[in-house]
RNA sequence: GCGGCUAUAGUUCAGUGGCAGAACGCCGGUCUGUGGCACCGGAUGUCGUGGGUUCGACCCCCACUAGCCGCCCCA
């Protein structure tokens, strides 16, 4: 039996790396708060249908990359009995009272007896007859005559007569099915592969649109996709995202919202100290524009595709939009010649995009219009964008997002246009780490203000009191162990803190503690009451 | 899901069909209330897991698992 390890594509985040994660998250919270965003926390798993309808049934995410399972079903015996009872009445039967409740025994007008016995098979959830019970009941009660049994076999997945046990097809046995949902709690659940669908679901569920206000929500949390792990790509990955959504009357369709989001992201990356990012911007048009474009693209590809790489030849048929993502150098000129989505936008989309660009120009946020930026999720409309960064290998997108004017309605909600983004926190961490290395920044763990060294076990209890005093004064304190030899205390102290505080018999008696600065080597005696101040407490 | 590379001490990595190695780190000592430096000594371990070939396998072969990189796809 080997060691249990973190499962594939998941990993532990340990100090000091978690410092960086916290830094990123607090920066996000700080910046987003200035734009009046509030935090939303949605469940980590949702009804599978949410993603199927929101993200798109045909996307790879939904078709093969989700962690989906059927929630444990609880068999509803009462529902089965009620249904059975209805059927019994239809046959003019009556139950015999002294038989155990899960059994029903019936006498028909012609004198034959009908017995039924349900048990729940614990492993499969399948209902079966118990022949033995039927026979022993007959013997016990001295029942003779023709035996006929009306039974019900309920198969959880709707298997039909093929699965009825052979012995039940014997001429004397009458098998029938009872209709009804006997597993009312059964539900297909999925670990969220992204968070936008969950946020929009919450928006609809809590009728946030009825406030008449724009909802500005951000989230920070893990997402799950069952993909092959790669640099910056994990099965449990972390996203920081935000959504602006609301009724059109609140201005949710305004291009100013798009520009504001993009400006906020640029500010966020700048404040984090990420250098060298690129904003790529495009418009994929309205829900009507995109199909027209895909059609034109398909037609153009009929002639061009055979001259492209094998991957593109396949994409041309399967998913024409993905041809635009091709990275093979030789293909680029030919792909540039293909129809551009910009030429298929309706007047509104065109004007919308122009205003987004104008607002970005006005506040000096640099961007590149990338006619080939066509994002994968079904719900995107109009503005789409990506912030990319070199040095991330094949996974060069730091974050991405776009407008989704129809998503709420796709999920059965009111008209609620919105725009949002998701930042790949794992990739931000990679990028910041790479920058730190490049800058030669020390990633040394933070040193404590003081290391308290109790000298002897007799001083242990009182040394905790001392540590408590200092910590309550706001100091970062490490506490040693009274059994350590002095040399060891110094070695430990030197690794963990800037100063060491000796607390031995002598100090306890005199009320004067010994403090030594590891940097300067200077050693002084201080009254215990002044120690916190001396160590730099405010 | 597919392909290439990889898996040896806490870490980074050498290694040879015949006793399991280095550096750093760790522990102890020189030094019993004074660290860093130096010197001396010590422990590092299922050589990823399971099979096979062989007198003998860390090494060769097969399978599996995981990691890295890329493909698909995507943030």
Image (cartoon, coloured by chain):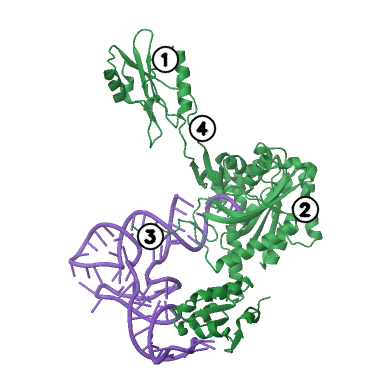
Chain colours: A green, B purple
Q: Nearer the viewer, mark 4 or mark 1?
A: 1
Which labelled disc corresponds to residue A3? 3
User: Where does the image place residue A522, in percent across and percent down from the top left?
Assistant: 59, 89
User: Where does the image place residue A1, in percent across and percent down from the top left?
Assistant: 33, 57
Q: Which residue is mark 4?
A: A184
Label 2, label 1: how far apart the Cα atoms are: 74 Å
Q: Please, what secondary structure does the residue beneath circle 3 have?
A: loop
Label 4, label 1: how far apart the Cα atoms are: 27 Å
Name the chain under label 3.
Answer: A
Using the rendered image, report if marks 2 and 1 lie on a common chain: yes
Q: Which residue is mark 1?
A: A94
Q: Earlier in the sequence, mark 1 or mark 3?
A: 3
Residue drawn at point x = 44 percent, y = 83 percent = A485
Compared across the picture, whether A302 is left or right of A93 comes to right
Q: Please, what secondary structure does the residue beneath circle 1 have?
A: loop
Q: Earlier in the sequence, mark 4 or mark 2?
A: 4
Instruction: Determine whether label 1 and label 3 are within 8 Å by CB.
Output: no
Q: Residues within 10 Å of mark 4 (few under 14, many from 20)?
A: few
Q: Nearer the viewer, mark 4 or mark 2?
A: 4
Q: Which residue is mark 2?
A: A356
Q: Earlier in the sequence, mark 2 or mark 1?
A: 1
Q: Earlier in the sequence, mark 2 or mark 3?
A: 3
């Amino acid at each position: 039996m080997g060691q249990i390890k973190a499962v594939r594509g998941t990993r532990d985040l340990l100090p000091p790396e978690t410092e960086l994660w916290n830094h990123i998250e607090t920066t996000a919270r700080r910046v987003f708060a200035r734009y009046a965003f509030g935090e939303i926390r949605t469940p980590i798993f949702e009804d599978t249908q949410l993603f199927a309808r929101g993200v798109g049934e045909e996307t790879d995410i939904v078709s093969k990359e989700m962690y989906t399972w059927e929630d444990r079903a609880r068999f509803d015996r009462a529902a089965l009995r009620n249904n059975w009872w209805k059927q019994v009445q239809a046959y003019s039967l009556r139950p015999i009272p002294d038989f155990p409740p899960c059994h029903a025994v019936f006498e028909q007008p012609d004198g034959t007896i009908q017995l039924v016995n349900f048990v729940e098979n614990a492993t499969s959830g399948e209902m079966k007859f118990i022949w033995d019970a039927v026979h022993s009941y007959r013997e016990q009660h001295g029942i003779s005559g023709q035996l006929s049994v009306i039974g019900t076999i309920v198969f959880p997945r709707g298997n039909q007569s093929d699965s009825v046990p052979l012995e039940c097809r014997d001429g004397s046995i009458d098998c029938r099915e009872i209709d009804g949902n006997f597993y009312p709690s059964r539900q297909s659940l999925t670990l969220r592969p992204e968070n936008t669908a969950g946020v929009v679901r919450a928006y609809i569920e809590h009728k946030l649109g009825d406030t008449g206000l724009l909802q500005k929500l951000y989230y920070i949390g893990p997402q799950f996709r069952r993909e092959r792990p790669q640099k910056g790509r994990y099965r449990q990955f972390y996203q920081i995202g935000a959504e602006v959504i609301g009724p059109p009357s609140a201005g949710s369709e305004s291009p100013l919202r798009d520009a504001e989001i993009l400006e906020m992201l640029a500010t966020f990356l700048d404040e984090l100290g990420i250098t060298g990012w690129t904003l790529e911007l495009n418009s994929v048009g309205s829900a009507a524009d995109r199909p027209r474009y895909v059609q034109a693209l398909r037609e153009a590809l009929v002639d061009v595709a055979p001259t492209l790489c094998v991957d593109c030849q396949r994409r041309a048929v399967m998913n024409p939009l993905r041809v635009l993502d091709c990275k093979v150098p030789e293909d680029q000129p030919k792909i540039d010649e293909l129809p551009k989505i910009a030429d298929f936008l309706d007047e509104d989309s065109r004007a919308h995009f122009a205003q987004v660009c104008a607002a970005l120009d006005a506040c000096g946020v640099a961007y590149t219009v990338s006619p080939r930026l066509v994002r994968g999720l079904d719900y995107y409309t109009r503005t789409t964008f990506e912030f990319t960064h070199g040095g991330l290998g094949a996974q060069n997108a730091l974050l991405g997002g776009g407008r989704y004017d129809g998503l709420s309605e796709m999920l059965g909600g009111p008209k609620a246009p919105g725009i949002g983004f998701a930042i790949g926190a794992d990739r931000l961490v990679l990028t910041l780490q790479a920058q730190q290395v490049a800058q030669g920044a020390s990633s040394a763990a933070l040193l404590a203000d003081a290391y308290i060294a109790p000298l002897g076990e007799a001083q242990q209890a009182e040394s905790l009191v001392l540590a408590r005093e200092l910590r309550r004064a706001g100091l970062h304190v490490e506490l040693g162990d009274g059994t350590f030899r002095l040399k060891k205390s110094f070695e430990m102290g030197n690794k963990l803190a800037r100063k060491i505080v000796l607390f031995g018999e002598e100090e306890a008696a005199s009320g004067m503690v010994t403090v030594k600065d590891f940097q300067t080597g200077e050693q002084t005696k201080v009254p215990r009451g002044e120690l916190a101040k001396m160590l730099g407490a405010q």
